[in-house]
Image (cartoon, rainbow, N blue to C red):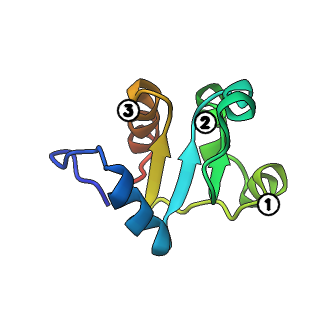
Amino acid sequence: GLGAAAEPSVSYQQLKDLKKADVLHIDVRERWEIDRFGKIPDSINIPLGELMEALQMDPTEFKERYNQKMPSKSDPVVFSCLAGTRSKQALGFAMSLGFS
């Protein structure tokens, strides 16, 4: 996982390499952005405004809503957005909930 001192940014190539492993990629853009700019393959879309609720859901509800197994607090998770601001907020939210 990313420690507090680790640089939380990854390059496009690093992300491609990570996605070959078992990493959950959460795209925190709004749904209209996904519609307009496209979905990143193998990512799940959880808009930033829903993220806190989503990460605290019952795993069964998470799976029903997002069609994906809910990450455990130790699972590797990558957040992305358009410019990086929202994904940094998402990382802060996840860490505040105990994700490593």
Quadrant in the rendering for residue 74: bottom left
In the rendered image, the quadrant that contains the N terminus is: bottom left
Quadrant in the rendering for residue 64: bottom right
Q: On screen, 93 above or below 99?
A: above
Residue 2 on image: x %, y %: 28, 54
Q: Earlier in the sequence, mark 1 or mark 2?
A: 2
Q: Earlier in the sequence, mark 3 or mark 2?
A: 2
| Three-letter code, disc 3 | Lys
Between label 1 and label 2, give the one nearer the viewer. Answer: 2
Is residue 37 visible in the rendered structure shown here? yes
Residue at 66% in and 45% down: 39
Q: Residue at label 1?
A: 60
Q: Are marks 3 and 2 in contact (CB under 8 Å)?
A: no
Q: Earlier in the sequence, mark 1 or mark 3?
A: 1
Q: Which mark is residue 51?
A: 2
Say what secondary structure mark 3 lies in: helix
Measured in 3D between alpha carbons, the distance from the residue under mark 1 to the one under mark 2, in whole angstroms, is: 16 Å
Q: Residue at label 3?
A: 88
Residue 56 on image: x %, y %: 63, 45
